[in-house]
Image: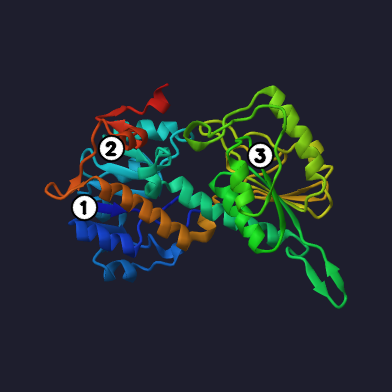
Amino acid sequence: MKIAVLRETAAGERRVAASPETVRKFIALGAQVAVETGAGAQASVSDADYEAVGATLGDRAATLSGAGIILCVQGPEPASIGGATPGALLVGGLNPFGERARVDGYAAAGVQALAMEFMPRITRAQSMDILSSQSNLAGYKAVLDAAAEYGKCFPMMMTAAGTVSAARVFVMGVGVAGLQAIATARRLGAQVSATDVRAATKEQIESLGAKPVFVEKVAGIEGEGSGGYATEMSPEYQKAQAELVSSHLAKQDIVITTALIPGRPAPRLISDAQLATMKPGSVIVDLAVEQGGNVEGAVAGEIVEKHGVKIVGHRNVPSRLAADASALFARNLYNFLSAYWDKEANAPDLPDDDEIVQGVRLTLDGKVVNARLLG
């Protein structure tokens, strides 16, 4: 089995889908690994690093020629992956909702597309979950980006010249990214509070030493939402939450927003009117900006200022930590493929009735087969 590792072509994408560590492991399984020249350059991995562990280097055509598995971070254009074996597995972050036409193209090309962001949130799939590994880094980086834009200190400092108050950080949305944002802000010495529509997150917030800010007397989500994500709430809850958040926002120095609903625009958490109540010099980092944003006025790829508040809207935040993001992403892909590796066939065996396979498989035998895209 030949595995092809592609050089990413999407604007601003610095990650790579395989590391020298995972290349070595794939070769140990019995696979051949071909890496497109320069694939790891922006993630601090040289071509020589790949060659040292047994990979072959070449242009895209040579890399894809005869490949039965294609690894990517972001889905390539269907026309750019010709030369692979018919029925080859395309494994990576394929953005099925945002790039539906591309998914149709994979089906037409006879590729079996496997979208890793559709990985079910179940125990045995945790080590394969690219959303968790990348969101964890995004939550960390969001706090550092906020600190870089904030004109004051994070921790309280007692000096001979007087005391500097600790920054107040408010995290909205307590998934993987939000929890890491809380932990990072706490490490930097900030006073941290957080909110979520899922009641189960209250204990998680408290366990990290932050203050939970929750709507009382109006029902939210008692446990987890679908797949561990939040779902849209009732108008009554949304109104109560807006009132609670408005009073809390006015006291905050930094806000990190992380709320996403799969397949839908990001929920609006902060309105322009609420922005106007915040202190001049405050900073908001909107991690949902590429899905429409949690903050009114946020612009993808830009840092804008409204009412004296900076709104940070960096695209592809995990790619801003390309080396570590690539290492984790690569392990996710290896953990997935190795779990199904048939040593006799020297190839993955993906059972049709397997919950993980059903979750990630988008196309098969020239058709789109994923229920989330057909429903």
Q: Which residue is mark 3?
A: 294
Q: Residues within 10 Å of mark 1 (few under 14, many from 20)?
A: many
Q: Which residue is mark 1?
A: 2
Residue 307: x %, y % from top left: 83, 46
Label 3 and label 1: CA atoms lie apart by 42 Å
349 relative to 256 in the view: left or right:
left
Residue 41's disc number: none
* Kind of residue at disc 1: Lys
Residue 133: x %, y % from top left: 46, 51
Task: Check contact, mark 1 vs mark 2: CB within 8 A.
Answer: no
217 relative to 133 in the view: left or right:
right
First-in-chain label (2 vs 3): 2
* Kind of residue at disc 3: Asn
First-in-chain label (1 vs 2): 1
Q: Nearer the viewer, residue 306 or 153?
A: 153
Residue 111's disc number: 2
Q: Secondary structure at mark 3?
A: loop
Q: Residues within 10 Å of mark 3 (few under 14, many from 20)?
A: many
What residue sits 81% from the left and 55% below the top?
281
Q: Residues within 10 Å of mark 2 (few under 14, many from 20)?
A: many
Residue 301 can be seen in this image: no
Residue 337 to residue 355: above or below: below
What residue sits 64% from the left and 57% below the top?
143
Label 2 and label 3: CA atoms lie apart by 35 Å
* Kind of residue at disc 2: Val
Residue 267: x %, y % from top left: 63, 34
74 relative to 262 in the view: left or right:
left
312 relative to 368 in the view: left or right:
right
What residue sits 50% from the left and 37% below the top?
228
Q: Secondary structure at mark 1?
A: strand
The answer to which quarter of the image holds residue 375 is: top left
Task: Check contact, mark 3 vs mark 1: CB within 8 A.
Answer: no
